[in-house]
Amino acid sequence: MALLEDGPLSARDISGAAGIPEKEVYPHLEHIQRSLLRERRRLIVSPAVCKKCGFVFKKRRRLTRPGKCPVCRSETLVEPLFAIRARDPLT
């Protein structure tokens, strides 16, 4: 959680900093997301973007990286980024 408070990171960045495989990062992110519900903070997810056509995966609920773009079928994607931010007092 401390890594995510410093700024947006990809799962690959978190994997390198924590010394765990990238596949193991996603269950930890889901746990962090559930844990933050009790606090005044939340997990911010910047969605993945297709580098070829610019499609933004903004409706995607899963935290994992998508395999390919549904529009152009390209596999060159900008990874989603994760950060922890304070929740707005009005929500």
Image (spheres, rainbow, N blue to C red):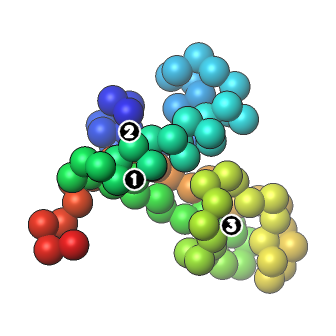
Q: Which residue is mark 2?
A: 4
Residue 59 spot, x, y in % from top left: 59, 77
Q: What kind of residue is marked 3?
A: Lys
Dot 2 or dot 1: first in sequence order is 2
Identity of the residue furthest to the left in this view: 89
Label 2: few (<14), some (14–19) or many (≥20) C-alpha neighbours in 10 Å: some
Rendered-image quadrant of the C terminus: bottom left
Q: Is residue 71 above or below residue 48?
A: below
Residue 67 spot, x, y in % from top left: 81, 59
Q: Residue at x 67, y 31 (%)?
A: 24
Quarter of the image where one finds residue 20: top right
Q: CA distance from mark 2 to mark 1?
A: 9 Å
Q: Are marks 1 and 3 in contact (CB under 8 Å)?
A: no
Q: Residue at x 14, y 74 (%)?
A: 90
Q: Nearer the viewer, mark 2 or mark 3?
A: 2
Q: Which residue is mark 3?
A: 51
Q: Residue at x 80, y 82 (%)?
A: 71
Q: Which residue is mark 1?
A: 43
Q: Is residue 35 left or right of residue 78?
A: left
